Image (cartoon, grey):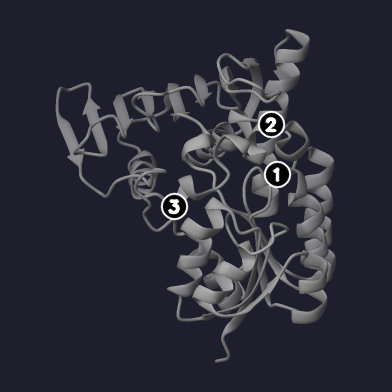
Amino acid sequence: MAKLRVAVIGCGAIAIRRHIPEYAANSNVELVAFADPVPGRAQGVADQYGGVAYTDFETLLREVKPDAVSVCTPNGLHAPVSIAASRAGAHVLVEKPMAGSAGEGEAMIAAAKAAGKFLMVGHNQRLMPPHVKAKEILASGKLGRVLTFRTAFGHPGPESWSVDGKESWFFRKQDAIMGAMGDLGVHKSDLIRWLLDDEVVDIAAFVGTLDKKDTDVDDNASCILRMKSGAVGTLVASWTYYKGGDNSTILWCENGVLKIDTDPNDQVIVELRNDTQERYRVGAMATNEKQTTSGVIDAFVTSIVTNTPPSISGEEGLRSLKVILAAFESQANGLVVRV
């Protein structure tokens, strides 16, 4: 079978550390082109992996006509680049948050559908081994219904992660649209929806900038979520966990508690009401400091090769995005918002 011809648009940190090396490691893929507006950035990657370098994505799409595209641009460009790629006949994997508004997300879904191509959103939290194991345990029924939960994602901020450091687009609202909520919070809205197989119906949120200087995007969010099932929980996203990041989730259920990433050795712990305990060592979460294979690239490639729609679809990405957008609305109006 001919290899999938893949192009990566946007050659910053997420492309360099995850998308590009994971495509390079996939035997079904040939990396054919890269685009980045910063002169030399795409060329540097092309020199390492092969393929052609461009400074603008439209020329790339027109000249290369790739089979599939990863959109790794600043958030504000996710929608226009994804829509252009779909119209050019490519399957699209877009980083999260998929868009800056629900309307943009819907337009992206429509463009992919009209082209007869897949649209997948890079919500890698679903694929991390501790979360896969936790989902399996919940599905077994041993814990009963989830009653309350706490899910959090925090680290020191993108200045230590982005290729541009403190000058990163992450801190410019025009490019980023949103801050910690778009970077981390949307991961958790997606995770809790998927883990509980449930939808968020109401949200009350405090979203703001507590400590980052010279930026107009949020660096912290604390939210209360009510699910369709009636379960109630909290979601926290932070760029100011300067010492000790957090990517943990705890679910309090009828028959016990399920703890994810609360222990340095055992990533999943079940404590039942009859005092029995189960501990699982299934592999660590990916962190900014220590990358592990995200699983997203392989899942995207498998979808295309087998012609199977991706489970982390545009529709799924949009549902998770709407939770985050509702949090901003809650902050703006001081109200509980129906999602």
Q: Nearer the viewer, residue 203 or 123?
A: 123
Residue topped by disc 2 = 178
| Mark 2 crowdedness (10 Å alpha carbons): few <14, some 14-19, many ≥20 | many
Q: Which mark is residue 127?
A: 3
Q: Nearer the viewer, residue 141 or 40?
A: 40
Contact between marks 2 and 1 (CB within 8 A): the answer is yes
Q: Residue furthest bottom?
A: 1
N-term mark: 3 or 2 = 3
* Cα gap from disc 1 to disc 3, whole angstroms: 22 Å
Question: Which amino acid type is marked by label 3?
Answer: Leu
The quadrant in which the N terminus is found is: bottom right
- Examine the image and state in which quarter residue 90 appears: bottom right
Instruction: Tell me residue 239's x, y (percent).
Output: 51, 26
Residue topped by disc 1 = 75
Question: Which amino acid type is marked by label 1?
Answer: Asn
Mark 3 vs mark 2: in front: 2
Secondary structure under badge 3? helix
N-term mark: 2 or 1 = 1
